[in-house]
Amino acid sequence: MNIDDLGEIHCRIIEWYRREQRELPWRNADCSAWGVLLSEVMSQQTPVARVAPIWLEWMERWPTPADLATAPPGEAVRHWGRLGYPRRALRLHEAATAIARDHDNVVPSDPVVLQSLPGIGTYTAAAVAAFAYGVRTVVVDTNIRRVEARLFTGDALAAPTLTAAESRLAAAVLPDDDEDAAVWNVASMELGAVVCTAKNPTCGSCPVLDLCAWQRAGAPPYDGPARKGQKWAGTDRQVRGKLLQTLRDAHGPVSRGTLDLVWSDEAQRDRCLAGLIEDGLVEPLDGEQFALPT
DNA sequence: GACGCGTGGTC
DNA sequence: TGACCAAGCGT
């Protein structure tokens, strides 16, 4: 990859983004850093189509970190609805509390500080700094990894988990210019989300098709290590989901007898309920009653 | 580094 | 049609 090709790739993908980007509520110019943070956490492992309505509801209900911090954590879990991975709601509540208490209710712009907040890892810290504040930082998510694997490395897919080589590559291809870097991060991510998808990529509408190493190699199939699928039916995940859904849908304490009805295997049910309590997602009350945490 | 963690859409 | 996948994180 010579420097001219890299510059051409930057230009074309950035132009493509300016032309084709989806209108998402958290991309409005007046969206706060809190709104960006919220959108990033909600989008972890979750399609944006399902995030948008919940994000709008949260922003109306809790427009700043302090507003969320004031609410009981259980309310965050309740209004998380069926987004999945409800521990994210709890961590968002903890993060909001820390931002209100330690950062004057202002979302930090330093990725290192952001990453010290609950539920904010490498990706989300970089994304918030880049998208909310325009900080020149290396953003690496699953979309960017796949785009760069194809475009620069010539592989059909990225590795199952983030490798050091992928991080180095992402840093190496980040534009030098601050503004270009800011757009590049969101633009390469968007390309992966809507064109350069994992299955059935629409290469015909790709702005860098002729520069793509994977295409030039004849689009060979993925030949890396196998990716393990997640089990669902009969797992603790499913049972936890059912228990929590019952507690969300009830607007007060639920008896153990009611929870007994959601899963017949008593040992597994008890284990999952204990796990939810351990995680802070459920609070045991007097008299064999259970509720979302207050 | 591997694993567990929710949910629903897609082909 | 069930496997795969979707803007990861914490342990």
Image (cartoon, coloured by chain):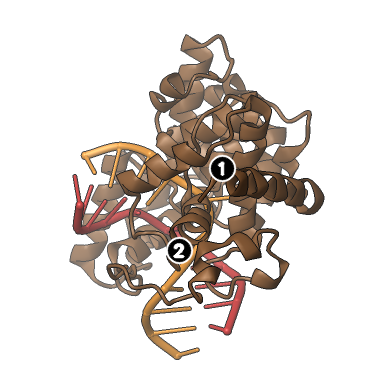
Chain colours: A brown, B red, C orange
- What is the x, y in percent for residue A217? 48, 72
Q: Which residue occupies 35% across, 70% down?
A: A232
Count of numbered circles on the image = 2
Dots 1, 2 in contact, CB < 8 A: no
Horizontal side of residue A221 vs A58, given as left or right: left
Q: Is residue A90 above or below residue A194?
A: above
**Which is more toward the observer, A23 or A234?**
A23
- Mark 2 belongs to which amino acid? Gly
- What is the x, y in percent for residue A41? 52, 41
Q: Are marks 1 and 2 on the same chain?
A: yes
C-alpha separation, residue under disc 1 versus residue under disc 2: 17 Å
Label 1: chain? A
Q: Which residue is mark 1?
A: A3
**Which is more toward the observer, A5 or A234?**
A5
Q: Is residue C3 above or below residue A97?
A: below
**Which is more toward the observer, C2 or A251?**
C2
Q: Residue furthest right?
A: A19
- What is the x, y in percent for residue A30? 78, 28
Label whose residue precedes the other's in the sequence (1 or 2): 1
Q: Residues within 10 Å of mark 1 (few under 14, many from 20)?
A: few
- Mark 1 belongs to which amino acid? Ile
Q: Secondary structure at mark 1?
A: helix
Where, by quadrant of the figure, is residue A153 drawn? bottom left
Q: Which residue occupies 41% across, 21% down?
A: A112
Which quarter of the rendered picture does the C terminus of chain A lie within?
Answer: top left
Q: Residues within 10 Å of mark 2 (few under 14, many from 20)?
A: many
Q: Secondary structure at mark 2?
A: loop
Q: Is residue A233 visible?
A: yes
Q: Is residue A287 visible?
A: no
Q: Which residue is mark 2?
A: A154
Q: Nearer the viewer, mark 1 or mark 2?
A: 1
